[in-house]
């Protein structure tokens, strides 16, 4: 084997070692990112399960605030982007006039 061939083979071997080291580093980083994504996915799944409960809590707070005209509850809900309006009580419908035969 000539000197040039020896230098080429040595350079290729060194390049292979660098590529193996880069592959190991990227694989380690990938495992860390996958663990982070798994934690986020678990959080999202748990949030979806609790969404119905949160909706009921907000509805109960809004009804309580509207019933008692509680500005503190209204302000609390508004800080979180939730607004509501109080419907005026419905006026009783006038009695229907008797129909002529």
Image (cartoon, helix red, strand yellow):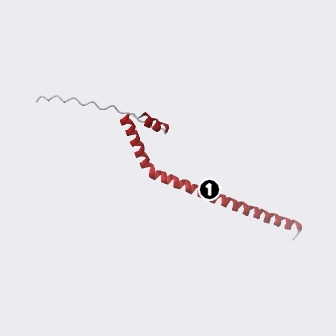
Q: Nearer the viewer, residue 13 or 48?
A: 48
Give residue 52's position: percent from left, percent from top.
Answer: 42, 49
| On screen, residue 82 above or below 98 | below
In this image, 98 relative to 17: left or right?
left
Q: Residue at x 88, y 69 (%)?
A: 2
| On screen, residue 45 above or below 55 | below
Give residue 7's position: percent from left, percent from top.
Answer: 85, 65
Q: Quadrant of residue 83?
A: top left
State which quarter of the image contains the C terminus.
Answer: top left
Q: Dot 1: what SS? A: helix
Residue named by callout 1: 33
Give residue 94's position: percent from left, percent from top.
Answer: 22, 29
Q: Quadrant of residue 61?
A: top left
How many marks the image carries: the answer is 1
Q: Residue at x 44, y 49 (%)?
A: 51
| On screen, residue 77 above or below 8 | above
Q: Residue at x 36, y 36 (%)?
A: 67
The extreme bottom residue here reads: 1
Q: Nearer the viewer, residue 80 or 68?
A: 68
Give residue 1's position: percent from left, percent from top.
Answer: 87, 71
Q: Quadrant of residue 17?
A: bottom right
């Amino acid at each position: 084997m000539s000197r040039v061939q020896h230098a080429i083979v040595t350079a290729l071997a060194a390049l292979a070692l660098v590529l193996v080291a880069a592959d190991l580093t990227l694989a380690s980083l990938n495992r860390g990112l996958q663990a982070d994504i798994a934690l986020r996915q678990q959080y999202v799944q748990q949030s979806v399960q609790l969404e119905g409960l949160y909706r009921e809590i907000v509805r109960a707070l809004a009804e309580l605030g509207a019933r008692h005209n509680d500005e503190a509850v209204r302000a609390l809900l508004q800080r979180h982007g939730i607004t509501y309006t109080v419907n005026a009580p419905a006026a009783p419908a006038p009695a229907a006039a008797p129909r002529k035969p």
